[in-house]
Amino acid sequence: MTMSSTEPKTPPTYIVTSADHALRAAVMLQLEGGLTVSQVAERLGVARSTAHRLLQTLVYRDFAVQDEDRVYHPGPVLELATHSQSRTSQLRAAALPHLHRLVDVVGETANLTIRTGDTTRFIASVECRHALRVGSREGMVFPAHRTTAGLVLLAALDPVEVEELYAVERYGERPDERPDLAGLRTQLARVRRAGFALNDGLSERGVIAIGVPVRGPDGAALAGLSISIPTVRYDRTQLPTLVATLHRTAGAIEESGREPGTSLR
């Protein structure tokens, strides 16, 4: 049976850990550029020797290259999609310290996500330390209407733009991937009024996510900042506090993006 991309994603029962680590390392190189063995080992939570073997495998398969200073960079397979000074790279770099602080404050996994058309891509993800936690989504792509950040970013569009984005003719032979537009309009109106999005199991069962927009100097929404919480640990009475914390963090990211040498326009 073929699963539609509009259905919630469910992690596989058995994840091949080495493959998962290699893919995450490739995504880090694609999004960030140069990384050392120590940096990759720390981010993946593995030994330096394991990180070294992963990176050497990526080099062998042309996903990475190593320079004379032993720093790894995107290889030929990734370099066409990588631009170290892109707005996305700068946004990610500006946001990461704030994501780490957000995780320290709320104790849950934090994410930064951008929208491209009717999909969203997680460009940064910092996991919390709970044994039961929502794992990193870095590099993953989901339908925009199925993610917290996607709803936040869609709500920032003019309603006419949303209509055009989800026009029937754009879906051709994949009509099952088109959301119910009436229902989506209602969701987006709710997000606009509230100033945040609450996602209960849309992108993954058993996960609740809360998100707010991160805006550029012109006020346009550039990305969605969110936290992901296992449903069993979610306390709805904490929602106002969590939303306020997210807004403060989004403001801090926006301020960092205005620093000299950074352009998030």
Image: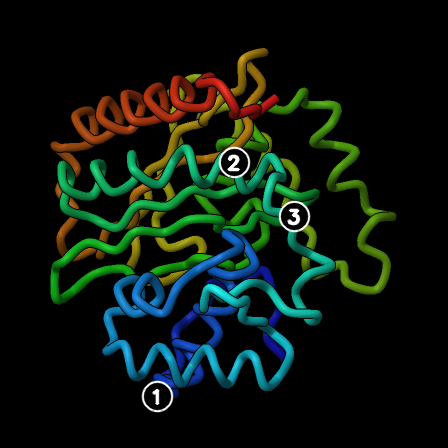
In the picture of the structure, the residue carrying the numbered disc 2 is: 90
- Amino acid, disc 3: His
Q: Tag 2 or tag 3, which sits nearer the N-term?
A: 3
* 180 and 265: which is toward the camera: 265
Relative to residue 251, is residue 7 drawn left or right? right
* 123 and 56: which is toward the camera: 56
Label 1 vs label 3, nearer the camera:
3
- Circles 1 and 2: CB distance less than 8 Å? no
Spatial distance from mark 3 to mark 2, Cα to Cα?
Answer: 10 Å
Instruction: Name the secondary structure under disc 3.
Output: loop
161 in relation to 53, above or below: above
x then y, percent, for residue 262: 52, 25
Instruction: Name the secondary structure under disc 2.
Output: helix
Spatial distance from mark 1 to mark 3, Cα to Cα?
Answer: 34 Å
- Residue located 42% across and 81% down the image: 54
59 in relation to 66, above or below: below
Task: Give residue 47's quadrant in the image.
Answer: bottom left
x then y, percent, for residue 162: 69, 31
The residue carrying pointer 2 sits among few (fewer than 14), some (14 to 19) or many (20 or more) residues within 10 Å by Cα, namely some
171 in relation to 99, above or below: below
Spatial distance from mark 1 to mark 2, Cα to Cα?
Answer: 35 Å
Relative to residue 152, is residue 179 drawn left or right? right
Instruction: Name the secondary structure under disc 1.
Output: loop
Can you say which quadrant of the picture contains the C terminus? top right
Relative to residue 234, is residue 143 drawn left or right? right
- Amino acid, disc 1: Tyr
Residue 83: mark: 3
In the picture of the structure, the residue carrying the numbered disc 1 is: 14
